[in-house]
Image (cartoon, rainbow, N blue to C red):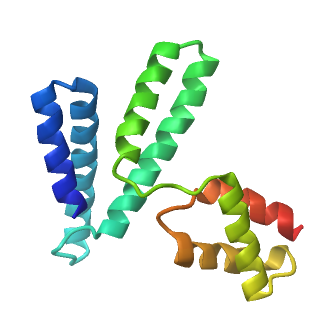
C-alpha cells in the first residue's frame, strides 16, 4: 500500500515539477530498496511490511529533525529549511501523529492499565505504548513523559 503511494506521489511530483518532493521520494525509495535487499538476506522474500516502512519513515524524520538542530546551530538556515521541506514530504506518508496532550494521555492510560509504579516498569510501559500506538506516537517524547510520571 505504501509502496504504491510512493510511486503515485512521485509521478504527480514529477508532472508538477516539484523537485524537492521528487528528490525526497527518491531518497525514500532508495532507503526502502536497501532495506528490502537486507530483508531478503534474512530469508524475507517479500521485503518490508507497511509497519516496517512506517518505522523507516519515522527514523528518517527523526534524523532530519536532528540535522535541523545542527544546521540552526551552525547558522545554516538554508539547509535547515531544506530538511524541513523533506520532513513535510516524509510525514505526508505517515498517519497523523499524536500531539503532546494526546501522548501524555496515552502514557497515563498505559501506566494505569499495566499498573506501573516506578522506573523499573519503564520497559513494560514503552512496550505497551509501542503495541497500542506504534505508528502514531513519537516515542522520544513518550519516553520522556513516562520517565517523568514514573519517577
Does 2 appear above or below 109?
above
Q: Where is residue 62 in the image (x, y as percent from the top left)?
A: 51, 45
What residue occupies the far right of the structure in this picture?
151
- Quadrant position of the N terminus in the picture: bottom left
Residue pictured at 38% horizontal, 60% vertical: 54
Residue pictured at 46% horizontal, 14% vertical: 78
Does 132 appear above or below 53?
below
Side (left or right) of 84 relative to 90 = right
Side (left or right) of 57 relative to 80 = left
| Res. 55 image quadrant | bottom left
Between residue 122 and residue 54, name the one nearer to us: 54
Q: Position of residue 85 (x, y in %)?
A: 40, 29
- Quadrant position of the C terminus in the picture: bottom right
Side (left or right) of 102 relative to 120 = left
Does 68 appear above or below 53?
above
Residue pictured at 47% horizontal, 37% vertical: 64
Residue pictured at 76% horizontal, 66% vertical: 146
Number of dots carrying numbers: 0
Q: Position of residue 17 (x, y in %)?
A: 16, 24
| Res. 137 image quadrant | bottom right
Amino acid at each position: 500500500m505504501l509502496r504504491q503511494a510512493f510511486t503515485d506521489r512521485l509521478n504527480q511530483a514529477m508532472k508538477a515539477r516539484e523537485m524537492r518532493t521528487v528528490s525526497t521520494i527518491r531518497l525514500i525509495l532508495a532507503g526502502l530498496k536497501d532495506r528490502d535487499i537486507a530483508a531478503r538476506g534474512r530469508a524475507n522474500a517479500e521485503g518490508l511490511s507497511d509497519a516496517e516502512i512506517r518505522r523507516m519513515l519515522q527514523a528518517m524524520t527523526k534524523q532530519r529533525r536532528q540535522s535541523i538542530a545542527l544546521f540552526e546551530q551552525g547558522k545554516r538556515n538554508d539547509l535547515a529549511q531544506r530538511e524541513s521541506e523533506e520532513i513535510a514530504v516524509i510525514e505526508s506518508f505517515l498517519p497523523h501523529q499524536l500531539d503532546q496532550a494526546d501522548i501524555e494521555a496515552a502514557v497515563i492510560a498505559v501506566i494505569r492499565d499495566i499498573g506501573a509504579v516506578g522506573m523499573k516498569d519503564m520497559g513494560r510501559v514503552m512496550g505497551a505504548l509501542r503495541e497500542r500506538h506504534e505508528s502514531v506516537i513519537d516515542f522520544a517524547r513518550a519516553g520522556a513523559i513516562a520517565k517523568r510520571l514514573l519517577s
